[in-house]
Amino acid sequence: MAAVQILVDTDVLIDYFNAGDHSQRLDSPGNRVYYSIVTQQELLAKRGLSAAERRAIRIALGRFRLVPLSAPLPTATRFCAASTRASRRRTRWSQRRRSSSGFHS
């Protein structure tokens, strides 16, 4: 079976670090996980991170592959981040709609 190439964004990695979301895909030895330098900087720039947390982020990112901004993306790369963002937008929208309409579940 060929390796699956996955490009992740900051939101996916935050979910992964905090709650283990996406771990089945990201931890699978048959998959290659990529992230950009922008994602790395966003993760490390968070206010309030301790030195130990920054070190843990760097260690975790060391398991994945950094894609330079000038590098072309592999053509078979899957974008699992898009579905996560879309799901969050739907959740936020439905929460706002319920609160503005007076309906609560």
Image (spheres, grey):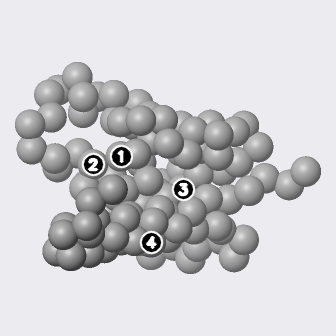
Residue plotted at (26% across, 75% down): 97
The secondary structure type at the circle numbered 3 is: strand
* Residue 13 x, y percent position in the rendering: 41, 48
The secondary structure type at the circle numbered 4 is: helix
Do the CB atoms of the residues marked 2 and 1 lie less than 8 Å apart? yes
Mark 4 or mark 2: which comes first in sequence? 2
Residue ID for mark 1: 14
Residue ID for mark 3: 34
Q: Residues within 10 Å of mark 4 (few under 14, many from 20)?
A: few
* Residue 23 x, y percent position in the rendering: 57, 39
Q: Can residue 37 be seen at all in this image of the molecule?
A: no
Q: Please name which of the two marks, 4 or 1, marks the residue nearer to the observer.
A: 4
Quarter where residue 104 is shown: bottom left
Q: Please name which of the two marks, 3 or 1, marks the residue nearer to the observer.
A: 1
Looking at this view, is 72 or 10 the one in front? 10
Three-letter code, disc 1:
Ile
Do the CB atoms of the residues marked 3 and 4 lie less than 8 Å apart? no
Residue ID for mark 2: 43
